[in-house]
Image (spheres, rainbow, N blue to C red):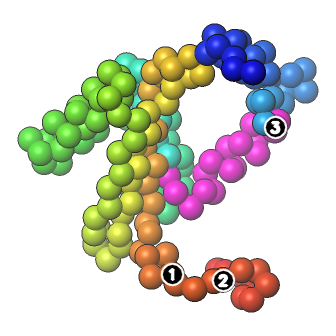
């Protein structure tokens, strides 16, 4: 059975709430704020969220971030968070945001050397079940260690990883 987008969004909304115990309930699970905060800040990648108005609204906070972020930046226009080489970087950032808003793109991916590391960045459009643009996510991490992986490594044939 094919459901309409409106029904999908209504169903998702009905399964997304904070219950009387303070647990965040989502269609695929539930957890408390402490677990969510810890999970987000301990991921091996960093996440930045930008709302539909291009405002910087959230960042994961860890010592391993490749691009440092500060609480003072929250609420600022994303375009203003790129002061280095503005004539080169800002038009590209604006192009990405515009393509997400007009629906011509949903994802951009890039990687480049950054000192002795390889910086891997993905930009994803965030849309609700109706397809409404809610903003975007920047997902960034150091992929230097994994670039040369070959063969198979599982918990069955290896020790713990530090």
Q: Are marks 1 and 2 in contact (CB under 8 Å)?
A: yes
Tell me the magenta residue range: 29-46
Q: Quadrant of residue 89?
A: top left
What is the x, y in percent for residue 128?
56, 22
| Residue at x-position 69% and y-position 12% | 7
What is the x, y in percent for residue 90?
18, 38
Tag 1 residue:
149
For the residue pair 128 and 71, the one nearer the viewer reads as 128
What is the x, y in percent for residue 92?
20, 40
| Residue at x-position 32% and y-position 77% | 116
Tag 3 residue:
29
Secondary structure, mark 2, is loop
The Cα–Cα distance between marks 2 and 3, rounded to whole angstroms, is: 29 Å
Return the disc, 2 or 3, that comes first in the chain's sequence. 3
Q: Quadrant of residue 140?
A: bottom left
Q: Is residue 45 visible?
A: yes
Q: Is residue 70 visible?
A: no
* 68 lies above or below 78: below
Camera-near label (3 vs 1) is 1
Left or right, residue 139 beside residue 101: right
For the residue pair 34 and 48, the one nearer the viewer reads as 48
Tag 2 residue:
153
| Residue at x-position 45% and y-position 60% | 141
Return the disc, 3 or 1, that comes first in the chain's sequence. 3
* 77 lies above or below 64: above
* 2 lies above or below 117: above
The Cα–Cα distance between marks 1 and 2, rounded to whole angstroms, is: 9 Å
Residue 112 badge: none
Camera-near label (2 vs 3) is 2
């Amino acid at each position: 059975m094919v459901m309409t987008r409106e029904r999908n969004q209504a169903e998702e909304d009905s399964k997304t709430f904070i219950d009387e115990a303070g647990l965040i309930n989502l269609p695929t699970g539930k957890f408390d704020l402490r677990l969510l905060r810890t999970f987000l800040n301990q991921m091996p990648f960093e996440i930045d969220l930008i709302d539909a108005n291009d405002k910087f609204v959230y960042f994961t906070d860890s010592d391993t971030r490749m691009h440092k972020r500060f609480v003072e930046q929250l609420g600022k226009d994303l375009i203003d968070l790129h002061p280095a080489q503005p004539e080169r970087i800002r038009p590209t950032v604006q192009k990405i945001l515009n393509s997400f808003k007009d629906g011509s793109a949903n994802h951009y991916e890039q990687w480049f050397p950054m000192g002795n590391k390889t910086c891997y960045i993905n930009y994803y459009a965030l849309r609700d079940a109706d397809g409404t643009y809610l903003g975007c996510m920047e997902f960034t991490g150091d992929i230097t260690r994994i670039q040369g992986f070959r063969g198979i490594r599982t918990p069955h044939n290896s020790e713990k990883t530090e």
